[in-house]
Image (cartoon, grey):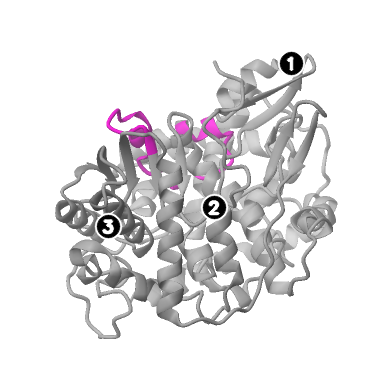
Amino acid sequence: MNNQWPKWINTQGHIGSQYPYYFFKNNNMLFNLNFLEIYKEMNIDKPILNVQSVAEILMRSYIIGDKTLIKGLKRTPWLGTFDTSSQSWQYKKLPPHDNKKMDKIEAAKKLKSLIYEELLNYIGSSKKIGILLSGGVDSRILAGILREIELNKDFTGNITVYNWGVLDSRDVWYAKQIADIYQWNYKHYPLNPETLKRNFYLVQKVGAETNPVNLHAMESVALDEDSEIILAGSYGDTLGRASYNGIPLKDVPPIVLNNANKLGILKDSVVQSFYNTMKEESMSYRKTDEHPREEYQYRELEYHQHHSRRYLTTAMSLIAMDKPLFQMLTSPKVSSFLFSLDLSLRTDVLYENILPMLPGKINEIPWASTGKKFGENSNNASDEGRVSSHQYGYWLRNDLRPFIDQKLDINLLTNLSIFNEKALKILYKEWTTSTGDGVNRLDTMISWLTAFSMFIKKYDIENEHVYKKSIKDTLNSLSLGPKLKAYKFARSRVKK
């Protein structure tokens, strides 16, 4: 067990670093990316649930700030480095936003050059590189620039493509095509009900902070011996194209929503107890930021501090526990350049101009999301490949239904005194009649609640405060069934 700071993490000043767990023991700071290992080291007699963290996961699918689900254990802070001499955290400063306008081709060339330099720094002396490659455009740009590095002899080792998904998905087809063009080693990991079931256990290694459906085949990548480091392009939508959850940056809502308990799964008194604290913590960076910014620019920082850091990198840490993992676009030089650009450039326009510059004409390969070349406006896709790389929703409701029934302990959750019991039962009932292959809101709720039940039972976690039921909880229960029926009907209509 290694409880020292992982030496490979020298990216604390990067927007997309990794964030180990930490706590003090015998006047020493202990760090570990693996929750299971650091929890053993803590040796807690009676672990206490951090109820605010539960409220945040159910509201946003991630925890805000540095908390975990256990009181006394934290994640290292955003942009923070621990100074052993002063026994305090020192923080890197983020660059200012600007509205610089450039010729789109020149901007694309500049970004490509900065990514080239960024990747070289990540590679260092490594001789075996792994790259996470899908049918999307972000990882494709990563692959193309990495291939250019290889052609220029700036890297002379081995490159392995890691790809996962069902065999009839575009993510699999297009990743394999790119790997073949570049003559790289290609490893495909299938996604199936057994992989998903395994992830309910693996998510405990990150303290049940994320959803099992987010882990895909990351364990296989972590354990594969054909790579020393992993390169990923997961920040492409956010930093590269200023799109957050599919919403343009200027339209993104605040981290803490006005209706923080939309389905009424939690007791209303729980949400009311923590709402103001959640809001304050979500905007904590504003207190120390030295640059004037517009509201949407502050929100961009907050999405990276909380959403990207606690949602995206939490799942990715399953790989980072075993080997260094680095994210394209997140180094200070690259992020500074992107922040400096006018939003008219932080769109598809940069990618549309970078892709033709890349070797192997990989810009001719369609984009998995549409089945068309990136930026193409034609009506018809070039193939009938599956858009999604998985069938998680279907597998949860069918193949894994006995497993869910066994592991989802509604009585155990109710005994924590934070859940609206009737709403939980209604949620489960409506979930069982959902349809479709994809993951809907009910699927994500049920799968996380199942993983959370396993977490609570494994560690015998207690809640130290009793929350009373209110009239609002009764009303939430009465309205939930019709709400969920309407939601399922709307989704079914969209698919037709």
At mark 3, the secondary structure is: helix
Query: Which of 77/198 is in front?
Result: 77
Residue 212 seen anywhere in this rendered image of the structure: no
Q: Which residues are magenta?
A: 202-229
Q: Nearer the viewer, mark 3 or mark 2?
A: 2
**What residue is at 77 percent from the left and 56 percent from the top?**
285
Q: Earlier in the sequence, mark 3 or mark 1?
A: 1
Q: Which residue is mark 2?
A: 331
Q: Is residue 193 left or right of residue 305?
A: left
Rendered location of residue 309, percent (x, y): 60, 49
Residue 457 seen anywhere in this rendered image of the structure: yes
Q: Nearer the viewer, mark 3 or mark 1?
A: 3
Q: Nearer the viewer, mark 1 or mark 2?
A: 2
Q: Residue 171: which numbered mark, if any? A: 3
Q: Earlier in the sequence, mark 1 or mark 2?
A: 1
Rendered location of residue 53, percent (x, y): 70, 44
Rendered location of residue 321, percent (x, y): 48, 30
**Amino acid under label 3?**
Asp
Query: Which of 51/381 is in front?
Result: 381
Q: Residue 45: which numbered mark, if any? A: 1
